[in-house]
Image (spheres, rainbow, N blue to C red):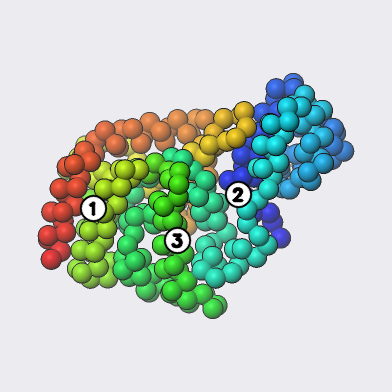
Amino acid sequence: MATVRTAKKLLLGKEIEHMINAAGKNQSEAAALIETGQPRMAGLIDGKGNIAVGDLERLANKLGFTDAGYQAALLELRRDGHKRGFWSSGYHRAYSEDLRLRIDLEKHADQIRSAEVEVMPGLAQCEAYARALHADMPEQGDLTLEDRVQARLARQDIYDKPEAPSVHFVLSESCLRRVWGDEQVMCEQMDYLIKLSNQPNVMIQVMPFNARPGRRSPIGNRFTLMRVPSPGVAGPLELAYTEGEGEIRYLDDKKALTAYDTAWTRLATAALSFDESRKFVRKVAREFE
C-alpha cells in the first residue's frame, strides 16, 4: 500500500531537503549517510516515505544539524497523528485518496485562500447544501449519503480550533446562483455564508458577473492556496491545489505558486469588498425567498 502523504510528511521532506542543501550534499550522498538509496531519499523529500527515528537523528547529525531543539521538531513532524485505519473508518472513507492530502493540509494550515466557481467550496457549505449536492451521487460499496455529508461538514471543524486559520474565499456569482436542492436550501446556504463572514478569521468576497478581473485571471478555474507553518527552519509549506477534468493536482514549485498568487491578488482586487459582498449575498437570498 502506498504511503499517504500528509502535511507533516511534506514538512519533514522540506526540512530534509533544506538540511541536504545546506550541507552541500546531493540526494545520493545524503542517502549514503544512512545506508539507503537515492530513490528512497527522493521519496522522503516528496512526503511519500517513512524514516525511522534513528535514521532521522543520524541524518541530521551527519549533515551538521545537531541542535536538540531542531531535532525534536523533526521528530515531531515524523510523528503522524493518523492511526492505522484512520482513512478507512467511518465517514473518513468518503475522502478519495487524492483528496486526503488536502484534508490534512486544511487541518494544519494557518492560511487558506480559495477561488471558486459554480459550486460552493466545501469549507463554506451548510448541511442542507452538502446533502443536496451529494444526493444523486451513485452508491459506492457501503458508503452512504450520510457518510459523504458528514465528511464534508467535518472539514469545517478547523474554524473552531484554538489557532484557527485565516480563510479567504473569492466566489463567482455562479456559486450563489447555481441551485442545488431547491430555493429553501439556497436560502439556508446564503444565510450560512453571512454567518461565516461574521467570524473574525473568515473573509468572503463575491465576484459578480459584470466584474472585469482581466483576461488572464483564471476566474473559470477553481484553485486553493494553502500555507502550513513549520516548526523547523526551512520555512512554511506552500501549495496550490487545483482540480480539472477529473484530476487533482498539488503544485509547490515557485513558478506555479507565483502565478496563482498573482491570479489570486487580481481576483480579490476585482471582487466586491467584504461589506459589499455581504449585501450581495443578502440580495441573492431575498431572490430565493
**Which residue is identified by label 1?**
194
Counting from the top left corner in percent of width and height, residue 199 is at: 30, 47
The C terminus, quarter of image: bottom left
Q: Pointer 3 and pointer 2: residues touching (CB < 8 Å)?
A: no
Between disc 2 and disc 1, whose residue precedes? 2
The residue that appears at 41% across and 52% down in the rendered structure is 160
Number of callouts: 3
In this rendered view, identify the residue nearer to me: 61 or 30. 61
Report the mark closest to the observer, 3 or 2. Answer: 3
**Secondary structure type for disc 3:** helix
Question: Does residue 32 lie above or below 143 as drawn?
Answer: above
Report the mark closest to the observer, 2 or 1. Answer: 1
Counting from the top left corner in percent of width and height, residue 213 is at: 26, 36
Can I make out residue 171 in this image? no
**Which residue is identified by label 2?**
6
Side of 260 where 73 appears, left or right: right
In this rendered view, identify the residue nearer to me: 220 or 166. 166
The N terminus, quarter of image: bottom right
Counting from the top left corner in percent of width and height, residue 278 is at: 19, 47
In this rendered view, identify the residue nearer to me: 24 or 190. 190
**Secondary structure type for disc 2:** loop
Between disc 3 and disc 2, whose residue precedes? 2
**Which residue is identified by label 3?**
154
